[in-house]
């Protein structure tokens, strides 16, 4: 199997782009908050709870992107007879996501 992670520079339309950007902005703020918590010697469990919240938020972003990609890019690839390659690429990235 080919590794497309460094050579694949395809562009795509993001139907939920603004929603994703808003989520990522919130996550950025949460990460800065954790930085401050560590800097200010906050209780470890409080920091770990914030990290868990960020991981959950990142999973939601990832799943939203997988859904959009499947419904648009993969569906179009299947229609164009390139479905096998597109599905293989998607499965590889999903495998990396759940490691």
Image (spheres, rainbow, N blue to C red):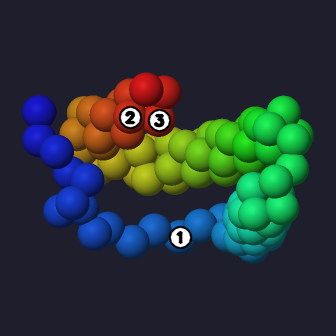
Depth check, front residue: 82 or 4: 4
Q: CA distance from mark 3 to mark 1?
A: 22 Å
Q: Say which residue appears at 45% left-offset and 68% top-offset.
A: 12
Up/down of 69 relative to 98, above or below: below
Residue 24: where, in percent of width, then height? Answer: 71, 65
Residue 43: where, in percent of width, then height? Answer: 87, 41
Q: In the displayed structure, does residue 50 sit left or right of residue 86? A: right
As drawn, the residue found furthest toward the front would be 41
Closer to us: mark 2 or mark 1? 2
| Count of marks overlaid on the render | 3
Q: Mark 1 highlights which residue?
A: 13
Q: Secondary structure at mark 2?
A: helix
Q: Mark 3 highlights which residue?
A: 97
CA neighbours of label 3 inside 10 A, class few (<14), some (14 to 19), many (20+): few
Q: Which mark is residue 96?
A: 2
Question: Is disc 3 in contact with disc 2, using a CB cutoff of under 8 Å?
Answer: yes
Q: Secondary structure at mark 1?
A: loop
Q: In the displayed structure, does residue 85 sit left or right of residue 61? A: left
Q: CA distance from mark 3 to mark 2?
A: 4 Å
């Amino acid at each position: 199997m080919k590794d497309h992670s460094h050579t694949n520079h395809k562009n795509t339309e993001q139907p939920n782009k603004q929603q994703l950007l808003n989520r990522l902005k919130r996550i950025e703020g949460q990460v800065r908050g954790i930085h401050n918590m560590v800097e200010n010697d906050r209780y470890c469990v409080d920091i770990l709870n914030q990290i868990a919240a960020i991981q959950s938020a990142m999973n939601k972003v990832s799943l939203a992107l997988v859904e959009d990609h499947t419904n648009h890019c993969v569906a179009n690839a299947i229609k164009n007879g390139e479905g096998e390659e597109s599905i293989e690429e998607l499965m590889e990235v999903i495998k990396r996501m759940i490691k």
